[in-house]
Image (spheres, rainbow, N blue to C red):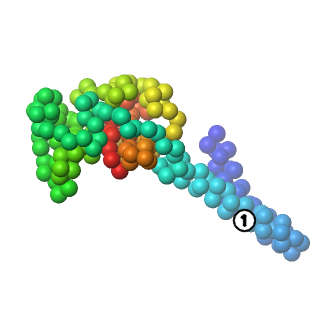
């Protein structure tokens, strides 16, 4: 199969322009079609890739009422709420604070409004019922088909849902492209 694809690409990239060059003295239109057909093919493939991997071309998914555990984006939190989950490590950043709680992360701005929540090792689930360990198909049933995907080295495949109205993004990481390994909800 791969050999067949490579042969087809060779024909498109090399042979068609040569055929076009041969037809140039007889018909400039025919020559132009043969010469520029590989360029058109490359532009179509590049356009498809941009559409498939870019959140600007994905329909919006309503994430306004989506929580992870008891934490909601743009909600002010207290350290007492964090202590209920166990011990945590607090780091001060120039744009706010970040908290690590048993391998999961929560970030706030300087006013302590939640801007990012990541459920990794703590058994937290989303308002819609998705949790680490679930099948990615369950996520697609819950949130729908309006998402884009990409691979990140060391993290695996990510399925991303965008809420343009509220500026929220839900990223679901998979460890083996089937099992949810991390759920990340943030403001973008």
> Is residue 62 something that shows in the picture?
yes
Q: What percent of the width, then of the height, locates residue 169?
A: 38, 43
Residue depicted at 37% across the width and 30% down the height:
180
Considering the numbered disc 1 on the image, is that residue within a helix, a strand or a loop? helix
Q: What percent of the width, then of the height, locates residue 186?
A: 32, 44
Q: Quadrant of residue 64?
A: top left
Q: Nearer the viewer, residue 83 or 64?
A: 64
Where is mark 1, residue-wise? 36
Q: Nearer the viewer, residue 120 or 175?
A: 120
Q: What percent of the width, then of the height, locates residue 94?
A: 17, 57
Q: Which quadrant of the figure contains the N terminus?
A: top right
Residue depicted at 43% across the width and 47% down the height:
165
Q: Tell me how many marks there are.
A: 1
As drawn, the residue found furthest toward the bottom would be 25
Q: Dot 1: within a 10 Å radius of its alpha carbon, few (fewer than 14), some, or many (20 or more) residues?
A: some
Q: What percent of the width, then of the height, locates residue 86?
A: 12, 29
């Amino acid at each position: 199969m791969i050999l067949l694809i490579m042969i087809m690409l060779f024909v498109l990239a090399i042979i068609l322009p040569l055929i076009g060059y041969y037809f140039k003295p007889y018909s400039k239109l025919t020559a132009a079609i043969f010469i520029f057909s590989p360029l058109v093919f490359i532009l179509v493939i590049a356009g498809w890739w941009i559409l498939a991997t870019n959140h600007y071309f994905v329909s919006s998914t309503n994430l306004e009422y989506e929580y992870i555990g008891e934490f909601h984006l743009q909600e002010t939190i207290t350290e007492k709420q964090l202590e209920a989950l166990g011990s945590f490590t607090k780091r001060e950043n120039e744009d706010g604070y970040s908290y690590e709680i048993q391998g999961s992360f929560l970030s706030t701005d300087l006013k302590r409004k939640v801007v990012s929540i990541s459920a990794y090792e703590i058994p937290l689930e989303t308002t819609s019922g998705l949790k680490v360990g679930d099948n990615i198909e369950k996520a697609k049933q819950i949130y729908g088909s309006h998402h884009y995907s990409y691979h990140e080295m060391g993290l695996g495949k990510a399925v991303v849902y965008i809420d343009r109205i509220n500026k929220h993004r839900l990223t679901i990481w998979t460890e083996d492209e089937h099992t949810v390994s991390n759920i990340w909800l943030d403001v973008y």
